[in-house]
Amino acid sequence: MRTIIEGGTIVNEGRTFDGSIIIEDGNIVDIVDSSEIIDNSSENSQLSTIDARGCYILPGIIDDHVHFREPGLTEKADIDTESRAAAAGGITSFFDMPNTVPQTTSLEALEEKFAIARQKSHVNYSFFYGATNDNMDTFAQLDEHRIPGIKLFMGSSTGNMLVDRREALERIFSTAKLPLMAHCEDTEIINHNMEEAKALYGKDPEVIHHPEIRSTDACYESTKQAVELARKHHARLHIAHLTTAKELEFFSPLTTHYSPVKSLPPTSISQIKIIPPSALASSATRLSRRRRIARLYDRL
């Protein structure tokens, strides 16, 4: 089967131009400029065309951080509904997080998710494996060609996925061959801030005090620890939800305490994923200058 998407405005690899895309048996075989002549001499006798005049044609987006809630939390959403929404928005691949029920912290739970997605997903898919205090021995059995990485909750989390003991963190960073995606918040600092907030504002402080409880220091100290462990063990680290300008010093060439990320060897790549900051207005102002070079989209 040969399909030609013709006459659209193609946005690809830093260029925007009018042209056509040629697909054979489900695979893109050529992208041609409108000034070129399309070769229709293919042996494939079945030919269909899609008139894309007036439309933009863009590559599918890979969303590397979603919560599709299946299994176990399908009263909120499931792989069917959320992958439909993804497809409608131009997202053709997703990587789902492990905090479902059961949590994706065993090989059996991981296989269950793949089995569900094979039946229900409308786009490409994969799943992060969740780290716990005692499942490092299973890391060696993870297929690096099948899953994107291991999710590590160094801050408050559901179930048994909180990992903040130094010994366990050392083992995780030294054992993991896949990239580690870390959620960084210092639980001890958060708990201390919560007790102070309760003393000042009552047993259930209003959400306006969120930046005081999950403070800049809580984020900073946890991210600092993650970066130090990644450098020590040459682990590949992806910091999720980077929310304060202060944390950026670990990844900026302007830092005086840490060498810039771009100088790391290939086996120690660190990445940043930024969402709108929840801590300080000054952070928001400083982060806004970096938004052109940082990915802002995150599924909450």
Image (cartoon, rainbow, N blue to C red):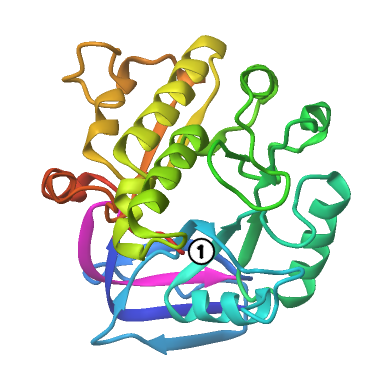
Q: Can see residue 295?
A: no
Tell me which residue sits at (68%, 43%) in the image: 161
- What residue did someone put label 1 on? 28
**Residue nearest the viewer, comparing 296 with 57:** 296
Q: Quadrant of residue 141?
A: top right
Badge 1 marks a residue whose secondary structure is strand
Q: Is residue 81 above or below residue 37?
A: below
Q: Is residue 186 above or below residue 31?
A: above
Q: Position of residue 165 (x, y in %)?
A: 64, 24
Q: Is residue 183 left or right of residue 147?
A: left
- Which residue is farthest right? 108
Quadrant in which the N terminus appears: bottom right
Q: Quadrant of residue 244?
A: top left
Tell me which residue sits at (33%, 85%) in the image: 52
Question: Where does the magenta region start and end?
Answer: 12-24
Q: Is residue 114 left or right of residue 92?
A: right
**Residue nearest the viewer, comparing 73 with 31:** 73
Name which residue type carries label 1: Ile
Q: Quadrant of residue 26?
A: bottom right
Q: Is residue 289 left or right of residue 89?
A: left
Q: Can see residue 66?
A: yes
Q: Position of residue 17 (x, y in %)?
A: 21, 66
**Residue nearest the viewer, comparing 72 with 265:** 72
